[in-house]
Image (cartoon, rainbow, N blue to C red):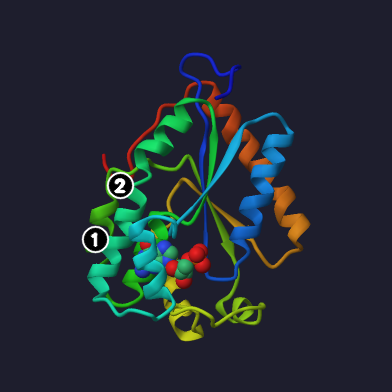
Amino acid sequence: MDDNCKSGCRGALVVLEGLDRCGKTSQSARLVKNLDELGYPAELFRFPDRNTVIGQMISSYLNSDSQLDDRTIHLLFSANRWEKRSLMESKLRNGITLIVDRYAYSGVAFSSAKGLDIEWCKAPDMGLLAPDLVLYLDISPEKASERGGYGGERYEQLEFQKKVAKSYEILRDASWKIIDANRTVEDVQEQIRDIVLDYVKTCRNGKSLSQLWLK
Ligand code: DGP
């Protein structure tokens, strides 16, 4: 709870998206730390959240310990986001900025890269909280594949990631900012922090929450 957050004030919902190994996870953690240090309470959320029962099913699928139909796993990923929705809303209303490592855009990008219809993919996530800002960490699939640890999980294959990159392009909207993820960790961190601060301030001034992909 942020005691300085008076009526109408809320935290910002900031999502980081990108291909596997684009650097989202370390940038998300750095961003939370930076915001806290600047006096803006912030917390990290990560999807899939592997700590829930649904998240454990997803984790087992990603590690190839279980096989699931493409639509079934798509719906599980979405359910994993829905199970956190009300918690996220109450934190935002308490003035806490949420830094979210992957969200519904990953859901659509990864499943539509398998050939599922994009509108079908969007449907289960309609009505989730809409992010105030989406930071897309842009890196070529080839460059990402050269980074350490690549190939450990089901989707970390170059040809598949090329399709994911194309799907992400289709999803871009006005809430997106494209960040060059080829630069140093510190440069990316600095750029992201400055962009996010503007949004945090706007949300503290009472920007209303809206729903994803609904008019
Ligand atoms: P991560 O923990 O960020 O490395 O994500 C694990 C993998 O799961 C990664 O390859 C991206 C993929 N992924 C994340 N969210 C979704 C989703 O909602 N749907 C699908 N199909 N894949 C997802």
Residue in the image at 60% along x and 28% along y? 201
Classify residue 19 as left or right of residue 56. right
Residue in the image at 71% along x and 41% along y? 34
Disc 1 is placed on an element classified as helix
- In this orientation, does residue 178 appear? yes
Q: Type of residue at label 1?
A: Glu
Residue in the image at 60% along x and 59% along y? 25
Q: Nearer the viewer, residue 73 or 64?
A: 64
Name the spot of residue 37 as percent of width and height, x first.
74, 35
User: Would you place residue 118 above or below residue 142 in this image?
Assistant: above
Q: Residue 79 appears in which quarter of the rendering?
A: bottom left
Q: Which residue carries the number 1 mark?
A: 119
Name the spot of residue 6 as percent of width and height, x first.
53, 14
Q: CA distance from mark 1 to mark 2?
A: 10 Å
Q: Type of residue at label 2?
A: Trp
Q: Residues within 10 Å of mark 1 (few under 14, many from 20)?
A: few
N-terminal label among 1 and 2: 1
Q: Residues within 10 Å of mark 2 (few under 14, many from 20)?
A: few
User: Image quadrant for the C terminus?
Assistant: top left
Disc 2 is placed on an element classified as loop
Name the spot of residue 1 as percent of width and height, x first.
55, 25
Q: Which residue carries the number 2 mark?
A: 213
